[in-house]
């Protein structure tokens, strides 16, 4: 089995159950996957974990892979999703998550006293709960934009979408998220609401 065989043929062989074909795909793309994972996580150990997860997802998803996108593009998206999942599980940077919407109040850093810390932790928990409730087509672009700081162009490339589609999905994600957060009523508390209104955001 020559290394010059293209991805499409290797994918077809791997779908037939040929492990050597998939091994060649791994060898061919592992550097790209690792570097992408390292750039997203900032940790070699986490990058290794994301790389393993991405290739595992690729192997498991091969039977359903129809080749509408290039294998490398599909693998890119699997890697990005694996990195997002890991970052979310590790709760990295939750207190500085920017929702990029004047109607949504920021999640403040925890204060020194235990009660304020508990309140901030509850805010973060409910915020992530609301984010997790977003449909996948809206959640992934949202996390790439707000958690990772991707540009619209980078998100479009990662997800195989047009930039206009990315923007519309982000707008919809913010509407859904705002609605979910506001449904909690007293979730933000009086002080947070006053602070937000003072900055020009009106929750009503």
Image (cartoon, rainbow, N blue to C red):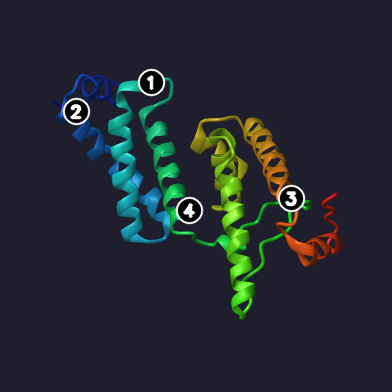
Let me know if residue 200 appears in the view: yes
Element type where label 3 sits in the image:
loop
Describe residue 100's horizontal placement relative to residue 197 as left or right: left
Q: Please report the residue visible at 33 percent of the width from the left and 29 percent of the height from the top.
A: 61
- Comes first in the chain, label 4 or label 1: 1
Element type where label 2 sits in the image:
helix
Please give the residue where the numbered disc 3 appears in the rendered image.
Answer: 101
Q: Foreground: 96 or 125?
A: 125
- Mark 3 to mark 2: distance in Å? 47 Å
Q: Please report the residue visible at 43 percent of the width from the left and 20 percent of the height from the top.
A: 68
- Comes first in the chain, label 4 or label 3: 4
Task: Please tell me whether mark 3 or mark 2 is closer to you in this view.
Answer: 3
Q: Position of residue 125 (x, y in %)?
A: 57, 57
Q: Position of residue 155 (x, y in %)?
A: 55, 40
- Comes first in the chain, label 3 or label 2: 2
Q: Is 53 above or below relative to 75? A: below
């Amino acid at each position: 089995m020559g290394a010059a065989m293209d991805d499409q043929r290797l994918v077809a062989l791997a779908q037939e159950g040929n492990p050597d074909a998939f091994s060649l795909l791994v060898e061919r793309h592992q550097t790209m996957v690792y570097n992408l994972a390292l750039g997203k996580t900032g940790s070699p150990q986490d990058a290794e974990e994301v790389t393993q997860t991405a290739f595992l997802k690729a192997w498991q998803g091969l039977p359903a892979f129809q080749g509408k996108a290039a294998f490398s593009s599909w693998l890119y998206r699997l890697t990005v999703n694996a990195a997002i999942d890991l970052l979310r599980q590790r709760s990295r940077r939750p207190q500085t998550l920017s929702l990029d919407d004047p109607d949504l109040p920021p999640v403040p850093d925890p204060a020194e006293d235990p009660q304020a810390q508990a309140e901030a932790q509850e805010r973060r928990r409910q915020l992530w709960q609301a984010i997790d409730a977003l449909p996948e087509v809206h959640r992934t672009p949202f996390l790439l934009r707000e958690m990772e700081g991707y540009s619209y162009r980078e998100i479009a490339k990662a997800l195989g979408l047009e930039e206009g589609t990315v923007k519309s999905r982000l707008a919809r994600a913010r509407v859904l998220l705002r609605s979910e957060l506001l449904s909690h009523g007293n979730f933000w508390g009086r002080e947070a609401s006053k602070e937000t209104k003072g900055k020009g955001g009106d929750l009503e």
